[in-house]
Image (cartoon, rainbow, N blue to C red):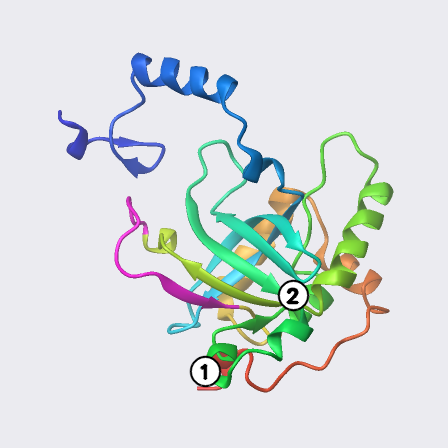
């Protein structure tokens, strides 16, 4: 069987050869990977396809600050070692968002509902007391609630694609609990069970977080 006919870790292609593993290990010990060392937060939520908002996908964001007003995130389908890199998200402050032209602003989404509903959360490290981690998480939520995100996915894993096919897809976020349909509700419930968290508890603890006014040009997924 040739490599084009094989599948490894849910992706088209052959398993790593011994040669590739040796080269991989050697490179990982010799190189610095400085941009990746800047990653400082793992965020989990769901994205919807801007062109087809009835389609949604779990998104594990691994984010770094470029500066106080700009963050950049690598997005994977799972937090597991063989996760697929499915997209990227840039997050900017409301101050920078207002400097964008109208056409550009329509590509960005808000994070208010994600934060206030409890959907967006930071998976905690094993062994750390929940109360301590939740304190760090809620401080992060206080910052993210006012940010705008621009997200593109390159790999449509929800279709079962074995490779990143087609054009990049603009993604959006949810802005109301009635969006997403039954498919999202099932994914959301399964996500909470997998990470052993309670969205409702997170929602209750975040009620004090002030909701910033969302610009009319954002969240165009739901305004078409």
**In the image, which residues are magenta?**
160-172
Quadrant (top left/top right/bottom left/bottom right) for the N terminus = top left
For image coordinates 52% across by 56% down, the residue present is 187
Q: Decide: few, some or many residues near mark 1? Use Cα within 10 Å; few <14, some 14-19, many ≥20.
A: few
In the rendered image, residue 165 lying in the magenta stretch gets the answer yes
Q: Which of marks 2 and 1 is in front?
A: 1
Q: Where is residue 26 in the image (x, y as percent from the top left)?
A: 44, 15
**Looking at the image, is 181 positioned above or below residue 34?**
below
Within the image, what quadrant is residue 219 found in?
Answer: bottom right
Which residue corresponds to the image point at 16% horizontal and 34% vertical from the top-left?
A: 4
Instruction: Residue 49 in the image: state x and y as whole percent.
Output: 42, 67
* SS at badge 2: helix
Question: Looking at the magenta stretch, what is its main secondary structure?
Answer: loop
Q: Badge 2, how many Cα within 10 Å: few under 14, some, many 20+?
A: many
Q: Do the residues labelled 2 and 1 touch (CB within 8 Å)?
A: no
Q: Is residue 95 magenta?
A: no
Q: Please give the label number shown on residue 114.
A: 2
Please say if 105 is above or below 191. below
Sequence-wise, which precedes: disc 2 or disc 1?
A: 1
Q: Is residue 158 left or right of residue 145?
A: left
**Outermost residue, left side:** 1
Residue for badge 1: 103
Quadrant in the picture for residue 53: bottom left
In this view, the residue in front, 106 or 58, is: 106
Give the quadrant of the C terminus.
bottom left
- Horizontal side of residue 44 vs 49, given as left or right: right
Quarter of the image for residue 177 reads: bottom right
Residue 95 horizontal/vertical position (percent): 68, 74
State the separation of the CA atoms marked 2 and 1.
Answer: 24 Å
Q: Is residue 138 left or right of residue 184?
A: right
Q: Is mark 1 on a helix, strand or loop?
A: helix
Residue 195 x %, y %: 64, 43
């Amino acid at each position: 069987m040739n490599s084009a006919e094989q599948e490894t870790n849910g992706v088209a292609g052959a398993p790593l050869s011994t040669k590739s593993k040796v080269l991989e290990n050697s490179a990982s010990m010799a190189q610095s990977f400085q941009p990746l060392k800047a990653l400082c937060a793992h965020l989990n939520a769901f994205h919807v396809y801007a062109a087809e908002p009835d389609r949604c996908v779990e998104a594990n964001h691994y984010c770094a600050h470029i500066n106080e007003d700009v963050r950049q995130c690598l997005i994977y389908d799972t937090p597991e070692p063989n996760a697929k890199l499915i997209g990227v998200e840039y997050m900017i402050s409301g101050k920078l968002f207002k400097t964008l032209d109208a056409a550009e602003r329509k590509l960005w989404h808000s994070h208010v509902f994600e934060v206030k509903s409890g959907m967006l959360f930071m998976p905690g490290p094993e062994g750390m007391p929940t109360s301590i981690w939740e304190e760090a998480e809620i401080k992060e939520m206080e910052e993210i609630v006012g940010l705008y995100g621009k997200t593109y996915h390159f790999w449509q894993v929800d279709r079962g694609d074995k490779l990143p096919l087609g054009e990049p897809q603009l993604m959006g976020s949810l802005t109301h609990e009635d969006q997403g349909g039954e498919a999202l509700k099932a994914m959301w419930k399964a996500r909470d069970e997998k990470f052993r968290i309670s969205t409702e508890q997170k929602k209750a603890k975040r009620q004090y977080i002030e909701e910033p006014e969302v610009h009319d040009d954002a969240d165009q997924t739901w305004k078409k």
